[in-house]
Structures are given as C-alpha cells and as structure tokens.
C-alpha cells in the first residue's frame, strides 16, 4: 500500500501545474520603448519583478522549438517598416493555440501595417478611425488587468476592431481564450507616462503575463508509461497479498 501511495503521489505531482512566476520569452524591439530599453526602465523593472527575473530575450520568433520552452511570449514593436515573417506568424498562432499567454505591442498610425499584422494573428482588424489621437480612457471591464486602474493616458493610440475591449477606447484588448493581449500604444508603459494609473495598469500587465496559464501535462507516451508502471505496481501489490493469503491457509 505504501508503494501504491507513492506511485499515485508521483503521478499527481507530474500532472500538476507548477507554481511561481512564468518564464517569458521576449522578442525585443529596436526602438526606445520596449523590454530592456531606455524608455521602458519602469516597465522592465515591473516585468522582472513579476517574473522573478525569469525572462530571456530573442531577436524574433522564428524558432518554435525555442518558444515552446517558455510559459509566455512578449512581442515588442519593431520599426514601422518592419514586419513579422510568415514563419513567425505561424509560430505565434500555434503557440497561442496551446493556451499560453502572449502580449503583442503596437503603436500609432505610422505603424499601421505592423498593427494590422499583430491584430490579424488573432482575427482582429485596425479601425479606420485609428488616425485620431487619444488622450485618456477608463476601464469598461473589471479583471486582473484593470484592477485599481482609473484614467489611463493613451497619447498616440490606435483602435482595434474585435476582441474584448478593456477600456472605453479599444486600445488594450483580450483575444482568443483571453490568453492574448494586444496593446496599441507603447507610450502607455513608458517612463514619461508612469503616473499612478498607468503604473497600476502596466504593473497588472506584467503580473498577468508572468502568471502561469496552462497546466503542464506529460506527452501521451509519458502518460502511458506512468499508467503502465502504476498498473504494474498494483499487480505486484495484489500478487503479494494473494501470496500471504495462501500462506495463512
């Protein structure tokens, strides 16, 4: 019986979700604003704290095998003439389908092609009203991302069509199974706009992406090995009991 308990405990441990902060793979941008860059000192610190420093940086998302090693992805904005490759789009799409969390950053109308690309990944579109400059916006949904947030400065935002809008202006949006977040204004989390409301929002975003979102389970072959091993242990226990019974008789 002791062996059986140990086997069951081991199996449950193997199937359970790990605790603690998620590991994040960041595709770093080349602008002033983005993880590890000069305009995002406060946001970088917030992400480092939320993830317990469990963040790695890569140039792109071309390597799906590398992406698979992380609990979450963060796509920083690139130059306004840059774009995602077809392979990157396929990799990000496949990663999203696994249920893990992804954050994709956009920017004002000069980056409209980039914005359309990242919104296209999740089935969204860019509003024809996106040339309008935004000022402040309040949350319209109460959740972990908007908790404790009031009026947020959105100085150069564009507007998404589709998804679940978190603010009056659809600048920050949840998609899919609420595991993808698009933010169409890099200035929201910049040092220049790090006022109490923007800081609260960006801190929430850092905590959200650093929260593990998917139970880690073994591949089917590994499950079969555990199951067959457990069945074997149960059989040995049963045989041992029958042997003791015969001796008593």
Image (cartoon, rainbow, N blue to C red):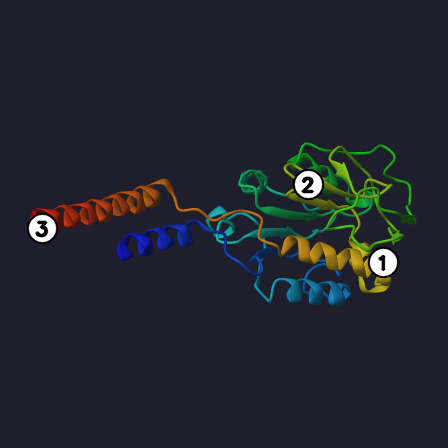
x then y, percent, for residue 127? 82, 34
Residue name at image x 85 percent, y 58 percent: 197
Q: Earlier in the sequence, mark 1 or mark 2?
A: 2
How far, Cα to Cα, is label 3 from label 1? 76 Å
Residue 188: x %, y % from top left:
81, 55
* 57, above or below 167, in the image: below
Between tags 3 and 1, which lies in front?
A: 3
Front one among 245 and 135 = 245
- Dot 3 or dot 2: first in sequence order is 2
Residue 168, which numbered label?
none
Helix, strand or loop status at disc 2: helix
Residue at the disc numbered 3: 248
Considering the numbered disc 1 on the image, is that residue within a helix, a strand or a loop?
A: helix
Q: What residue would you read off at disc 1?
A: 197
Q: Name the image quarter holding residue 34.
A: bottom right
Asked whether the viewer can see residue 121, the reply is: yes
In this orientation, which residue lies closer to the viewer: 122 or 62?
Answer: 122
Q: Residue at x 86, y 49 (%)?
A: 156
Which residue was labeled with disc 2? Answer: 118
Image x and y of residue 7, in percent: 31, 53
Q: Position of residue 221 (x, y in %)?
A: 32, 42
User: Which residue is nearer to you in this view: 18 or 100?
Assistant: 18
Q: Is residue 24 left or right of residue 182?
A: left
Q: Is residue 29 visible from the viewing direction of this image? A: no
- For this orientation, the residue located farthest to the front is 249
Contact (Cβ within 8 Å) of mark 3 with mark 1 = no
Residue at 71% x, 41% y is 174
Q: Secondary structure at mark 3?
A: helix
Label 3: few (<14), some (14–19) or many (≥20) C-alpha neighbours in 10 Å = few
Residue neighbourhood size for the residue with mark 1, other residues' Cα within 10 Å, grouped as few (<14), some (14–19), many (≥20): some
């Amino acid at each position: 019986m002791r062996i059986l308990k140990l086997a069951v405990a081991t199996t449950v441990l193997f199937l359970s979700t790990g605790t603690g902060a998620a590991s994040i793979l960041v595709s770093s941008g080349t602008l002033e604003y983005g993880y590890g860059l000069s305009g995002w000192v406060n946001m970088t610190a917030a992400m480092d704290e939320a993830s317990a420093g469990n963040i790695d940086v890569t140039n792109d998302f071309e390597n799906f095998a590398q992406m698979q090693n992380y609990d979450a992805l963060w796509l920083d904005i690139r130059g306004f003439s840059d774009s995602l490759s077809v392979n990157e789009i396929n990799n990000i799409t496949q990663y999203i389908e696994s249920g893990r969390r992804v954050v994709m950053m956009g920017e004002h109308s000069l980056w409209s092609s980039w914005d359309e690309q990242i919104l296209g990944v999740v089935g969204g579109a860019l509003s024809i009203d996106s040339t309008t400059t935004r000022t402040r916006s309040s949350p319209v949904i109460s959740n972990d991302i908007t908790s404790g947030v009031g009026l947020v400065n959105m100085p150069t935002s564009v507007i998404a069509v589709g998804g679940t809008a978190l603010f009056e202006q659809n600048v920050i949006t949840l998609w899919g199974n609420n595991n993808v977040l698009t933010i169409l204004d890099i200035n929201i989390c910049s040092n220049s706009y790090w006022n109490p409301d923007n800081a609260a929002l960006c801190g929430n975003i850092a905590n959200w992406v650093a929260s593990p979102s998917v139970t880690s389970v073994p591949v089917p072959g590994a499950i079969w090995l555990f199951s067959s091993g457990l069945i074997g242990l149960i059989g040995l226990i049963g045989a041992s009991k029958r042997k003791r019974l015969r001796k008593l008789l």
